[in-house]
Image (cartoon, grey):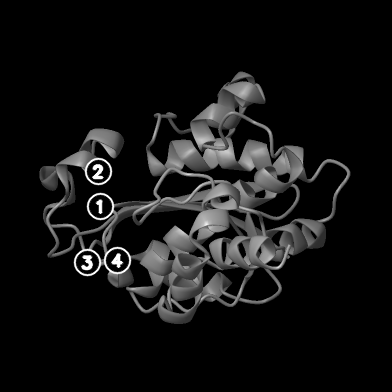
Amino acid sequence: MNFIILDTETTGFAQNDRIIQLAYIVYDGMNLEPFETFCSTDQAINFSAMAVHHITPEMIENQPRLIETEVYKFLEELNSEDNYLVIHNASFDIAMLAKEGFKNRMQVIDTLKVTKHLAPNLESHAMQYLRYHRGLYKEEAAIEQLLNIEIKAHDAMGDIVVLFLLLKRLLDGRSPQQLVELTQKPLLVNKLRFGKYRGQLISEVIKTDKSYFEWMISKLTDLDPDVKYTIEYYMNK
């Protein structure tokens, strides 16, 4: 059994965007082994994405396609239901990998969803917020030295070092399977992130415009499962 602690950097966040950096740590419960690669794509890097991860077109020029890299090929070898795939906001990275033909068979631990379940009242559940809130930054130097890497904020390898430290905290007193179950457990969403009621509380808007939410459930085939769960929860309450 291994934990595959993974992060990607991409050209952007839209449907046509692609992976330009893949990094993961393989953790067997005792040892850590890092894997990282840049890769090329025909999709131009969005400037907003570039401002976050600081990967420029020159850095991926002449790099192989992701599926041609040894890092990707080894990920395919690790792709077994015996292993755990650990990602912060797993649906995004798994969807990005799927664009490259990767069909995940590992058990998924989404640390974003798990922390939302365990600490719902936090101001934020973003990785960098948790890095400071949980004091994870204090332990980074030891991991950096162990892996012989330089940690950079928002860099894929830097993010998974933080993710590894977060995973260890979440596993304190819990089994991997419990984290998988929390990942799969529906989560109540406070506010809508799209549409005419964006930013408003679902619990309040549904009182005045129930038909809008009925339309969302019946027509939006790609509706986020947690949003759907929340709408049905308040409609049946």
In-front residue for pair 58/108 = 108
Helix, strand or loop at label 2? It is helix
Neighbour class for label 2 at 10 Å: few (<14), some, many (≥20)? some
Quarter-of-image position of residue 164: top right
Question: Residue 49's spot in the image, x, y percent?
Answer: 24, 43
Nearer-N-terminus badge (3/4): 3
On the picture, is 197 further left or further right than 173? left
Is 225 placed above or below 47 here?
below
Front of the two marks 4 and 1 = 1
In-front residue for pair 98/200 = 200
Front of the two marks 3 and 4 = 3
Q: What residue type is labelled 4?
A: Leu
Quarter-of-image position of residue 107: bottom right
Helix, strand or loop at label 3? It is loop
Nearer-N-terminus badge (3/2): 3
The numbered disc on residue 16 is: 3
Q: Which residue appears at 55% of the width and 61% of the height? A: 227
Return the residue at label 1: 12
In-front residue for pair 133/192 = 192
Return the residue at label 4: 66
Question: Residue 74's spot in the image, x, y percent?
Answer: 47, 68
Q: Which residue appears at 85% of the width and 49% of the height? A: 174
In-front residue for pair 146/85 = 85
